[in-house]
Image (cartoon, helix red, strand yellow):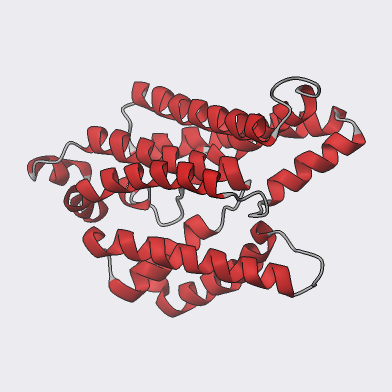
Amino acid sequence: MQSITRNYLVSPFTLGISSAAALGASICIVFAAGTAMDTDLGIILSAFTLSCVCGALVYGIAQRAGLTPTTLVLVGIALNYFFSALTATLEFFAQEHKLAAVIQWTFGSLHRASWDYVVIGALIVAFGFAVAMFYCLPLNVMATSDDETAVSLGVNPARLRTIVGLAAVLMTAAIISFTGVIGFVGLIAPHMARFLIGTDHRFYLPFTCVLGAALLLVSDTVGKLILYPVTVPVGIVISFFGVPLFIHLILRRGKEFE
């Protein structure tokens, strides 16, 4: 997402995926009581569906304006606020026990993990990752060139933004539907990888995956141990880890953001 928009502050969550997933989960928690959707699987399906709808809306609206990096980000931010407002409205009117369940889901946690869910998520992520790796050389061009230069080198910017961006949306939607919102790892891991090994996507993408997974596992372990026997949700812990680390990287390599 940072490469196709040439913006180091972008992640899949910039497109509103997380807020749409939170809305989907909230709708299921608040309104599905006593129905077939009143299960963990129902919440997962609802969150995944709204995330995919959000991704389709972002690309559909941005397509009408030419699918430039600016329009993609601006539409995503607008929908992010829109879905967040809808979720806040549901929380305002929800009964107390349902409100607690919604807030707990939005914290982000791995406590709902099961091997069945791991397999489903792994298959979707493997597909999206394969798509991204297939386009790693065009992504190198996109990350370092403007659209006109990319076209002269045989890259179709709009097509690449659509294919790779939707693959990122699909992977993100699949993961957060199971875990809840764990957002900061999607921003800090790419910067750590970029600072350590550079931006050749043949190595940069796999290394980002490794760093993101390591950061998530460390944060989850700390969350389980720091206030034992109480478990702090990993979405909270990773923000406490990520923010100072991110600021440290900026201070060390600030010129790369200019």
Q: For residue 45, what is the image quadrant?
A: top right
Quadrant hosting residue 48: top right
Q: In the rendered view, would you say 213 is above or below 43?
A: below
Residue 36 coordinates in the image, percent (x, y) = 70, 21
Q: Which residue: 70% across, 45% down? A: 106
Residue 214 horizontal side relative to residue 137, left or right: right
Residue 250 in the image, given as x and y percentages of width and height: 47, 72
Question: Farthest residue in the front direction?
Answer: 115
Can you say whether 207 is above or below 143 in the image? below
Q: Quadrant of the C terminus?
A: bottom left
* Residue for point 49% across, 36% down: 76
What is the x, y in percent for residue 99?
A: 84, 37
Q: Residue furthest bottom?
A: 252
Q: Quadrant of residue 31?
A: top right
In the picture provided, is 219 more to the left or to the right than 193? right
Q: How many marks?
A: 0
Q: As rendered, which of 201 and 161 lies closer to the eye?
A: 201
- Which residue appears at 14% of the width and 41% of the height? 155
Q: Is residue 83 visible?
A: no
Residue 74 in view of the camera: yes
Q: Position of residue 20 (x, y in %)?
A: 59, 33
Q: Along the line of sight, which residue is nearer the eye, 138 or 213?
A: 213
Left or right: 245 in relation to 10? right
Q: Is residue 256 above or below residue 91?
A: below
Asked whether 203 or 54 is in front, the reply is: 203
